[in-house]
Image (cartoon, rainbow, N blue to C red):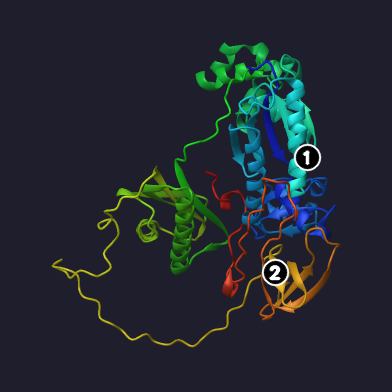
């Protein structure tokens, strides 16, 4: 435990929703909900205006719509949020070499390691300067907590929300924690909280008074001892700058159960491509390919195949995932699919010739591959492809400029033309196949950010996603990329 509040916890305020409000002037001050818009979608983030109606993260989207029917409901733009997160993380890196990201919008910082603060006054000054820099760089607000431990710094940032700074002086921990609910402590979720409630412990002071032996009896040696220490205000966990990635995976939850085996195979191949992209971006390769299938009855099956050596080859991962799918019964429908790679390494095995199935078929005696016979391609009549425009995504019109999709259906798409920093814009409606309308790029929220935090270009979303009227993935916790 430190004698000065030099551990900082930053938590951006309603991050996804706040980013959308900053990018879309007509939504400022209004309830905004970001998440999956399908029947099985869940809320990823709700703006503070939407929270007044009772909407909160992880709530089913249908329930959110009943509570706040007039809110703006948007699909997530993760590339856009990630670009803002990278700007924020660079600002944190200017404070200290020890930055521990927890998610896109949350991180711990060891101010002492960066030699920017050694006492209360220095820590407070660093925290206020960080908040000002984040606002100047991104146009968004973040809440800062300062304390002598990670646990208390996170509690302080919760107290500071929204757009504030809270500092807990070392030595006041037990007085502060005593009357608070046991749920405030790390590791106490709904199940553990209910278990403790049945034992008559609802506040942190109840835990401290119960003693370590009683908590060990109730929760086991490791959890009980850890909880007792935290109830007394003790937390000596260090800020860890880098965590070793153990796996890379992506998964999608679908708005409607998938029954078509060809469609399921196509989704697995698409997930394999996304997984390999993330694998290569992390600088890793892996030996074990993992397939996850959640069926219509919520039963979840996991299959894996271990290769002879680590790889980041798309063909190898895709074919292995396809072979794993063949061993899974998808009768009745599939609501979630996932593909992952584990057993990570920092190099790629060059000799992969036996890892993928051979491309040629073998005869019955297995004497060798049957040579492929060239077949003239059969021309198929071209079918019109209807473009899909997701609510909240960026577009650009040849005449009207940049805007965003308010909604689409029945062959029409409604667009509001406005940009960050502009006045609320006008709304216009077009045919979904209007040749002058195309997917656009997310514009930076701040045109001239502070030095050292250059905006990151954001790739434009594909307007062709979800072609043919097929339901796309329902965004939510299941569909978020796992953070390495």
Image position, residue 407 (x, y; %): 73, 68
Question: Would you say residue 196 is visible in this rendering?
Answer: yes
Q: Secondary structure at mark 2?
A: strand
Q: Secondary structure at mark 1?
A: helix
Q: Residues within 10 Å of mark 2 (few under 14, many from 20)?
A: many
| Left or right: 240, with 322 as reference point | right
Image position, residue 270 (x, y; %): 48, 62
Question: Would you say residue 55 is visible in this rendering?
Answer: no
Question: Quarter-wise, where is residue 32 in the image?
Answer: bottom right
Question: Quarter-wise, where is residue 230 in the image?
Answer: top right
Which residue is denoted by mark 2 in the rendering? 395
Image depth: mark 2 or mark 1 in front: 1
Q: Quadrant of the N terminus?
A: top right
Question: Depth check: 306 or 442 in front?
Answer: 442
Please tell me which residue is depicted at 66% across the width and 14% down the height of the picture. 208
Is 1 rendered above or below residue 30? above
Disc 2 from disc 1: Cα separation: 31 Å
Question: Depth check: 324 or 139 in front?
Answer: 139
| Count of numbered labels shown in the rendering | 2
Sooner in the amino-acid sequence: mark 2 or mark 1 = 1
| Left or right: 16, with 480 as reference point | right
Disc number for residue 404: none
Q: Residues within 10 Å of mark 1 (few under 14, many from 20)?
A: some
Is 369 rendered above or below residue 87? below
Please tell me which residue is depicted at 39% across the width and 53% down the height of the picture. 312
Is 147 rendered above or below residue 398? above
| Left or right: 480, with 357 as reference point | right
Q: Are the residues flagged by discs 2 and 1 in contact, CB closer than 8 Å?
A: no
Question: Quarter-wise, where is residue 434 in the image?
Answer: bottom right
Is 171 rendered above or below residue 297? above
Image position, residue 351 (x, y; %): 26, 53
Which residue is denoted by mark 1 in the rendering? 132
């Amino acid at each position: 435990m430190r004698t000065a509040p030099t551990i900082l916890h930053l938590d951006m305020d309603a991050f996804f929703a706040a980013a959308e409000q900053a990018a879309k002037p007509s939504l400022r001050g209004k309830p905004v909900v970001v998440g999956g818009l399908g029947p099985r979608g869940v809320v990823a983030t709700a703006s503070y205006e939407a929270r007044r109606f009772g909407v909160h993260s992880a709530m089913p989207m249908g329930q959110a719509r009943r509570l706040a029917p007039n809110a703006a409901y948007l699909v997530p733009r993760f590339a856009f949020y990630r670009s803002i997160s990278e700007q924020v993380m660079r600002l944190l890196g200017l404070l200290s070499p020890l930055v521990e990201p927890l998610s896109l919008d949350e991180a711990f910082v060891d101010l002492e390691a960066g030699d920017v603060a050694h006492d209360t006054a220095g820590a407070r000054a660093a925290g206020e300067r960080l908040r000002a820099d984040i606002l100047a760089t991104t146009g968004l607000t973040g809440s800062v907590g300062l304390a002598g431990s990670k646990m208390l710094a996170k509690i302080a940032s919760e107290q500071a929300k929204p757009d504030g700074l809270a500092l807990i002086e070392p030595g006041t921990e037990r007085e502060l924690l005593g009357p608070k609910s046991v749920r405030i402590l790390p590791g106490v979720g709904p199940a553990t909280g209910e278990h403790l409630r049945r034992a008559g412990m609802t506040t942190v002071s109840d835990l401290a008074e119960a003693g370590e032996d009683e908590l060990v009896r109730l929760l086991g040696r490791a959890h009980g001892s850890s909880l007792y220490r935290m109830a007394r205000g003790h937390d000596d966990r260090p800020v860890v700058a880098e965590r070793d990635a153990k796996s890379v995976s992506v998964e999608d939850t679908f708005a409607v159960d998938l029954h078509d085996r060809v469609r399921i195979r196509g989704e697995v191949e698409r997930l394999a491509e996304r997984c390999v992209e993330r694998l290569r971006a992390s600088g890793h390769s892996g030996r074990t390919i993992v397939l996850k299938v959640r069926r219509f009855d919520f039963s979840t099956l996991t299959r894996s195949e271990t290769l002879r050596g680590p790889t980041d080859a798309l063909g190898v991962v895709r074919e292995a995932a396809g072979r794993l799918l063949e061993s899974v019964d998808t009768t009745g429908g599939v609501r979630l699919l996932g593909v992952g790679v584990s057993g990570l390494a920092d190099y790629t095995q060059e000799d992969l010739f036996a890892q993928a199935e051979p491309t040629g078929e073998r005869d019955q005696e297995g004497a060798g591959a049957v040579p492929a016979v060239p077949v003239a391609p059969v021309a198929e009549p071209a079918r019109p492809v209807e473009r899909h425009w997701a609510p909240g995504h960026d577009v650009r019109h040849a005449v009207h400029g940049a805007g965003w999709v308010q909604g689409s259906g029945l062959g029409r798409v409604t667009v509001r033309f406005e940009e960050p920093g502009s006045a609320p814009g006008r709304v216009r409606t077009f045919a979904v196949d209007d040749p002058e309308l195309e997917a656009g790029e997310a514009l930076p929220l701040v045109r001239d950010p502070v030095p050292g935090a250059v905006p990151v270009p954001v790739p434009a979303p594909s307007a062709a996603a979800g072609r043919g009227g097929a339901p796309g993935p329902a965004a939510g916790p299941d569909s978020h990329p796992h953070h390495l």
